Image (cartoon, grey):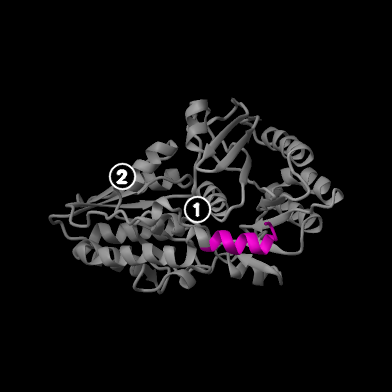
Amino acid sequence: MGVFHYFAPVNFIEYEKLTGFKLLVGAASRKVIAVCEAMNLVGINSQVTTGAVTGGSPECGRGRYLPSATFTHGSTTIQFLPSFGLPGLNRILAAFGYLKTALFNVEPSDKVLLYNFYPEYIPAAFVLKVLGNTAYLDIEDAPRIDEMGMRGVVNRLSYSILKLLCKKECIVAAKGIAKQLNLLNTLAIYGTITKKEEKYCGRDFNRSELCIMYGGTISYDTGLDLFIQTIKQLDLKLALGLKRIRFVITGFGGESELVDLRNSISNSSIILDIKSNLSASEYRYELEQAQAALCLKLPHSEMGATTFPSKVVEIASAGLLLFSTKVSDVPLLFDENSAILLDEASPEELCSALMNFVDNAAMYEKISRNGHKAMINHLSAETVGKKLSLFLGIQ
């Protein structure tokens, strides 16, 4: 039986402990490892090969050496390639590592899936094609025509090259991505809920202080301005009362704007708690304390049209109440009974939804429970594992 190899730049809590750095363990890391666990569940041995993702400061691995290491998560093997926390150099080292894995660890009966279209995959993809075991692409973010500078050029070029080197059949993060790129033979994998997460962990919606998370990459396209304008309206409209609302901001980006916003708040019922560069365990703790979380990616933006916010799967799988724009394929997974979907991505709409939540929080527990059920119905590990193994033709 062949092995499922997933090449992906992810992080893992045990590797964070080994290095002592606060490494970003985002929704992408969760998705990759959960998909491998789903494959294991249907009898396919799975391995993640990765180069660690570092942050912008020394405590987050910037400018530091990161050693190779191997871990197991359930039945999944996670192989970390040696790396160095400097832009460019880390990609070069990753390229050698992926190439070595393709040459010496991938058997003819194995299948290789590449998470997105990073340039460090190109040497390995070329070798796999020459050896007759062409890799598959997992397109998480369609290349953006509005992305200027070297990064945009590299992304578009890398996608073009890997599209030639990989199978015509692709995994996509959303059906909208396949449509935009004119891809005909695709399978949409939004993520999966793990077996452990299938047990609903109820949140206390009767607390005097309600906690709402906002994280990921924070920019205009992911709702930074929408969030700021909403908080300004809440500052004026939210009644001083028995309940407070605490926004825990765990993402990166927009730091100066968020600090200015925090300093401008006069309403004592609103707390802005900015917690960038959390460790994996610290982030997990915040997730477990929260009642709700925001996904504010703008549907009309180029990013909204080219990506799927995998964070919505993380939010609902954890049992939190999801507030989301109707971006990408989100309305295919959730409805008004399983999430708070904003008809318009406007401060007025979001402010109204948040005020209703604060005033009637206990009534929203059922919606969060339904959101969790939606993940089980659509994205159970068995369902995802069977669909993916069939699509890849691995037995």
Q: Secondary structure at mark 1?
A: loop
Q: Position of residue 356 (x, y in %)?
A: 24, 67
Report if residue 105 is visible in the image. Answer: yes
- Quarter of the image for residue 127 reads top right
Q: Does the magenta segment cover residue 369? A: no
What residue appears at the point 47 percent right and 50 percent down from the top-left corner? 216
Of the image marks 1 and 2, the number of the one nearer the N terminus: 1
Q: Position of residue 64 (x, y in %)?
A: 59, 25
Q: Secondary structure at mark 2?
A: helix
Disc 2 residue type (three-letter): Asn
Report if residue 309 is visible in the image. Answer: no
Q: Which residues are magenta?
A: 383-395
Q: Position of residue 196 (x, y in %)?
A: 40, 50
* Quarter the C terminus occupies: bottom right
**Residue 31 relative to residue 156: left or right:** left
Disc 1 residue type (three-letter): Ser
Residue designated by label 1: 219
> Tag 2: Cα neighbours inside 10 Å, few (<14), some, or many (≥20)?
few
Q: Does the magenta segment cover residue 392? A: yes
**Residue 68 relative to residue 245: left or right:** right
- Quarter of the image for residue 189 reads bottom right
What residue appears at the point 72 percent right and 56 percent down from the top-left corner? 136
What is the count of numbered marks?
A: 2
Residue designated by label 2: 263
> Tag 1: Cα neighbours inside 10 Å, few (<14), some, or many (≥20)?
some
In the image, 168 versus 84, the foreground residue is 168
